[in-house]
Structure formats: C-alpha cells, structure tokens
Image: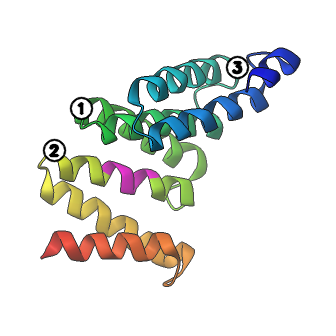
Amino acid sequence: MEMRKRVLGEEHPSTLTSMANLASTYRNQGRWKKAESLEVQVMETSLRVLGEEHPSTLISIANLASTYRNQGRWKEAESLDVQVMETFKRVLGEEHPDTLTSMANLAITWENQGRHSDALVLMRDCAEAQRRVLGEEHPDTLSSLTTVATWSS
C-alpha cells in the first residue's frame, strides 16, 4: 500500500484497492478503529475521484457498513446499506449479483435491529432472485436460503 501511494499516488484506483485490502485485514482481525479509518479514507477518495455511483465506490461504502455491522453499530450500518442497495438497483439493476449481496446485507442489519418481518421479506426476495440469477447451487443462494429457513423457524 505504501509503495503504491508513493509510486501511483494516493488517489489511484490500485492504491485504493490496496488500502481496502488492508482495511479488510484489520476488520477480519477485529481491529475496528484501524479498519474504519482506512475505509473512510477509501470511501471519501472514491466518492471524489470515481463518483457516488461507481461500483468501486459502492463496494467501499458497503465495506464500511460491514465494519459498523460487526461492531453492532446498526443505525450507521443501515444508513449505508440502504444507500448501497438503492444505488446498485438504480445503476446495475435489481437482479445484479452486487445488488443481491447488498439486499442480503441490509436484511441482516434489519434482523439485528429486531425488524424481523422486514428482514425476512427482504431476504426471501433476495434468495428468490439469487435462485433465478445465480442458480440453485450457488453459495450465495444457499446462504440466503439457509438464512430464510433459520429466520422462519
């Protein structure tokens, strides 16, 4: 990451990818402050350089939402999850795999906020679309179907 910053500059897409990868490592280690700090930098730079509808920008926002979710910061996660899902729907379409992932993320956030019926409806819709788009045996489809079954019992 440091070498890319030096050679390519702080706003180059490859530099942003390296920063996001390091943030992901921090998130996986539970180093929330470090992950959040890098994710905010990546998001802000992506918004400025790539624009608010660029898929890489949306992924950076989703990554920050994931860090918030992992810390139980549900309102902050929800705000970002809704933004990502709505923008993916508009830009990529309602059944694009990235849109479907964002739907599942929002459903998980809602479930953890106690919004069980909203979460279940959204996850069911997501699972059905994944079945059509990705197929019955795709890992994302299977994960969503398992979640629906768990939440329905």
Query: Tag 3 or tag 2, which sits nearer the N-term?
Result: 3
Quadrant for residue 47, please give it: top right
Horizontally, residue 1 falls left or right of residue 42, namely right
Horizontally, residue 141 falls left or right of residue 55, namely left
Q: Among all residues in the image, which is located at the extreme bottom?
A: 136
Residue 24 screen position, x and y as percent: 54, 39
Q: Name the residue that disc number 2 marks.
A: 113
* Span highlighted in magenta in the image: 102-106
- Crowd around label 3: few <14 · some 14–19 · many ≥20 (10 Å): some
Residue 27, label in figure: none
Query: Tag 1 or tag 2, which sits nearer the N-term?
Result: 1
Residue 71 screen position, x and y as percent: 29, 36
Q: Name the residue that disc number 1 marks.
A: 75
At 38% from the left and 40% from the top, the residue drawn is 81
Q: Among all residues in the image, which is located at the extreme right?
A: 7
- Measured in 3D between alpha carbons, the distance from the residue under mark 2 to the one under mark 1, in whole angstroms, is 8 Å
* Element on which disc 2 rests: loop
Q: Quadrant of the C terminus?
A: bottom left
Quadrant for residue 147, please give it: bottom left
Q: Are marks 2 and 1 in contact (CB under 8 Å)?
A: yes
Query: Tag 3 or tag 1, which sits nearer the N-term?
Result: 3
Q: Depth check: 1 or 105 in front?
A: 1
- Measured in 3D between alpha carbons, the distance from the residue under mark 1 to the one under mark 3, in whole angstroms, is 27 Å
Q: In this figure, what is the number of numbered marks?
A: 3
Q: Of the residues shown, which amino acid type is indicated by label 3?
A: Val
Main secondary structure found in the magenta portion = helix
Q: Name the residue that disc number 3 marks.
A: 49
